[in-house]
Amino acid sequence: MQIEDLNFAHPGSDFPALERISLGISMGESVALLGPSGAGKTTLLTLLDGRLQGWRGRASVLDAPLDPDQPPHRARRPDTGFVFQEYALVERSSVLRNVLNGRLGRMSTLRALFGSPAAHDLKAALAALADCGIADLAERRVDSLSGGQRQRVAIARCLAQEPRLILADEPVSSLDPARAAEVLALLTNAARARGATAMFSSHQPSLARRFARRIIGMSSGRIVFDVPTSELSEDATEDLYRDTEPMPNVALRAVS
Ligand SMILES: Nc1ncnc2c1ncn2[C@@H]1O[C@H](COP(=O)(O)OP(=O)(O)OP(=O)(O)O)[C@@H](O)[C@H]1O
């Protein structure tokens, strides 16, 4: 992935959400994005997923240039998988059906339309369920699952897609510390086993250190550091969050 001088402001916003972003990421790298709320992490991941238009600069993902004016061609989309913070699952469908949705981009239009997966689609979905340790949940409806189980379903759906680039937006924000570590281990190990690149955002520097080989710090739409994890100092991460402006009109009251 190669990005040069990327600039973007959300429609209607006076402030750039991304400003002069340049970076290169090699195939197979595991990268964490750290930064306070509003730093631009989601915006950057969404742009790399091809879902933002109207940006300036140059971006090439999986050796193909992204067009600032239109989404990537349908044939290329399955190569990038996205794990959403809020899971984005079909609540009333089974776990297996949700994971099979990860195959839609690789199915013929007819199969996708009628929801009839081929044998190899089913095989990929079952393998992803097994990799995520939730094979026994295949027939359960998503709305009967815990947060940690849903997060695994979201990751299994992404893996079933067989992407070469995995983008994950705060994939463990709603999990307790033990589950969060388990899920990040799952995500980064699965990416490594498949030779895929993984890029995830997080608010937890300790998890980023544990599961990424490289850490990029963002603040106010800019990259403030980009280092191998082994070279990241405690001071750099503290500074990243220390400079955060308090949110306007938010008063904190003591609970009596
Ligand atoms: N749809 C939108 N319309 C207008 N402004 C937006 C929109 N989405 C994000 N922004 C603004 O863009 C900036 C970057 O937001 P972004 O969501 O990328 O930050 P983030 O680092 O992911 O934050 P968080 O950690 O809270 O998820 C912020 O100033 C935010 O208010």
Image (cartoon, rainbow, N blue to C red):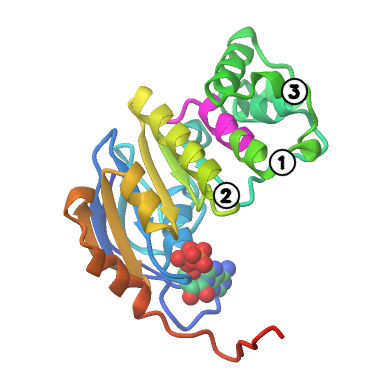
Q: Is residue 156 magenta?
A: yes
Q: Which residue was labeled with disc 3?
A: 115
Q: Disc 1 or 2, which lies upstream in sequence?
A: 1
Q: Disc 3 or 2, which lies upstream in sequence?
A: 3
Secondary structure beneath dot 3 equals loop
Whether 81 is drawn above or below 5: the answer is above
Name the quarter where the N terminus is drawn. top left
Secondary structure beneath dot 2 equals loop
- Of residues 199 and 107, the one drawn nearer to the viewer in this rendering: 199
Residue interval drawn in magenta: 153-164
Q: Position of residue 138 (x, y in %)?
A: 72, 21
The answer, for residue 251, to whether it is visible in the render is yes
Extreme left residue here? 231
Tell me how many marks there are.
Answer: 3
Q: Which residue was labeled with disc 2?
A: 176
Q: Is residue 123 magenta?
A: no
Using the rendered view, name the quadrant where residue 136 is placed.
Answer: top right
Instruction: Check disc 1 and give the amino acid type.
Output: Ser
The disc at residue 178 is none
The disc at residue 146 is 1
